[in-house]
Amino acid sequence: MKILGISAFYHDSAAALLLDGEIVAAAQEERYTRKKHDAGFPQNAIDYVLEEGRIQLSDVDYVAFYDKPFLKFERLLETYVAMAPRGLNSFRMAMPVWLRQKLFLKDFLLKQFRLQQESFEPEQLLFAEHHFSHAASAFYPSPFNEAVVLTLDGVGEWATTTVAIGKGNEIDIIKELHFPHSLGLLYSAFTYYTGFKVNSGEYKVMGLAPYGEPKYRDLILDNLVDVKDDGSFRLDQSYFNYTTGLTMTNRRFAELFGQPVRQPESEQLTQFHMDIAASIQAVTEEVVLRMTRSLASEYGMANLCLAGGVALNCVANGKILRDGAFKNVWIQPAAGDAGGALGAALAAWHTEFGQPRVASSADAMRGAYLGSGFNEQQIEQELTSAGAVYTKLSCEEMIERAAQALADSKAVGWFQGRMEFGPRALGGRSILGDPRSAETQKTLYLKVKYRESFRPFAPSVLREDLASWFELDEDSPYMLLVADVKKDKRSAMTAEEEALFGIEKLNVRRSEIPAVTHIDYSARIQTVHEDTNPHYHALISEFKRLTGCGVIVNTSFNVRGEPIVCTPTDAYSCFMGTDLDVLAIGNFFLSKEEQPKDLLSDYKDRYELD
């Protein structure tokens, strides 16, 4: 049976393909359109997954959509009616889109697919509830036979938080919290308040938090959110505007904290904003820890699966793991709406059609390397068309040259194998650097990524070397866990350095690997495994042979506001528009100094800031 899963029309549209229950391919639409968080119909992603599966749309048995638009429309209408006459402007903006497209989504999808396959039938369209899609994306690919499945996000149809029990091929949702009470929307409210873009900048708030103190934690808990012992909660809506308004927070929210909303890009981040970030991060951790402790006690299971946008909060994830209420934690790498495409397909296979499931010690995500790949001929053709100057090497020579470039503190664009599914670059489409040099961080900030300086870079570490460098000895292949650098690798701080505040702390050397050590000695860790990415594992191993260090800097291959690169042409454009020194793409090695000078460009302002 061939099942195509899709998510679309809100943010992060995507497509995924199952062939007899096996995950064959999955990708986000943004990678092909070059529009970050593209919410449009994922035609390019669909074309890719079908091509990867070597089938056509006429071969597909069912298409599964990741939520139920009628239920979402019901929630929208009930909310506007309950709040009337508030929200009239928002209502006027929302209704045309719903009436033109979203409300009649089944008809719209049917027309789209019939443009490509006239015989496509309405019975081939299946719809899963939003949170069931999330839960399916988390449990079915996990290595567990049974688990508690916790989904935390902004909002689906009505649900904002769900608890499910997964056993074998069955998932049963047993608890729900409903809109407007949402941990995801609470975090997004503070994202908006600190001047970052909602549904995009939440990870910036998480990165900013260690620079501050959680001074406003109690103020938030006393006024904005009422949290019970079991982690259930309610938000006081008199402080928020997201139910019917065009902003996340209102004047009363700003008055509570004593400052207005920060204007994006135009106002400097201050210690106040850092303390606000630290406070909402602390509250989020408090809620999820109460929740996971209660669930572990109530259901007595050893395993926890996580999905939904909040599951991308890797700091909170690390604390859940260290808390120990659950012995094992597995997080869907595409935890946001993109992963819903995969979840909808898996829900159809196991739930709708009752197909069996056998969990294995390795998860079913194939390291998340489920996106587009390019063979040697395709890469050479695109590089030649772009006017690139390159050297073709053997695989072993490529590893040696790239590792030496890293050891020489050069910034390396690394384009190998298939593209990652989800928001993290995991050694398929990555920019790499030497973690031992404090200059690496500055170079990547200022000359390559063009992003805010407070955001930390992540380490990729050989799985076998993990416990030597970090206070963690669990697999973290998807860069979704934060842990501390080992104490014996840290650098002692002077009294002067200890006294620094906020962003001043950024330039203090904190460990033997300063480029990946955040100001609180933490790191967002990716463990690299030889069986899932042998090429990347070989590169880090060679770097270790040269330097004694089995860790490298890994950040996504893009500039701020740009989706991660997808094609060799995308990679070369980014290479030529930034101060990357080297591009290693397949078996082709490119040095910046050898490239035609007339192809150099200013890439910084090509994309809208996120």
Image (cartoon, rainbow, N blue to C red):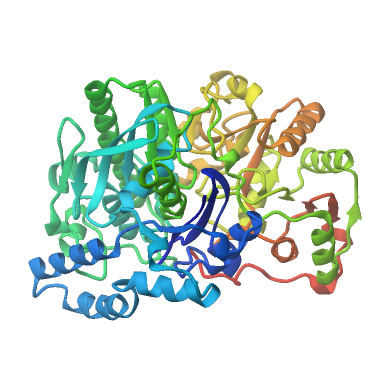
Q: Which one is in front, 316 or 80?
A: 80
Percent position of residue 371, x then y: 62, 53
Instruction: State left or right for residue 283 relative to residue 540.
Output: left
Q: Locate residue 19, reporting x and y percent.
A: 56, 48
| Residue 313 shows in this picture | no
Q: Residue drawn 81% across and 70% down?
A: 386
Decide if residue 597 is on the left or right side of residue 336: right
Residue 397, above or below 595: above
Residue at image x 73%, y 34%? 540
Q: Is residue 103 above or below residue 219?
A: below
| Residue 527 on image: x %, y % | 60, 31
Q: Nearer the viewer, residue 389 or 275?
A: 389
The percent position of residue 22, horizontal first and vertical second, equals 55, 43
How many numbered callouts? 0
Q: Nearer the viewer, residue 136 or 399?
A: 136
Q: Is residue 336 visible?
A: yes
Q: Quadrant of residue 469?
A: top right
- Residue lying furthest front in this view? 119
Q: Identify the residue shown where x is 26% and y is 51%.
A: 186
Would you place residue 288 above or below residue 344 in this image?
above
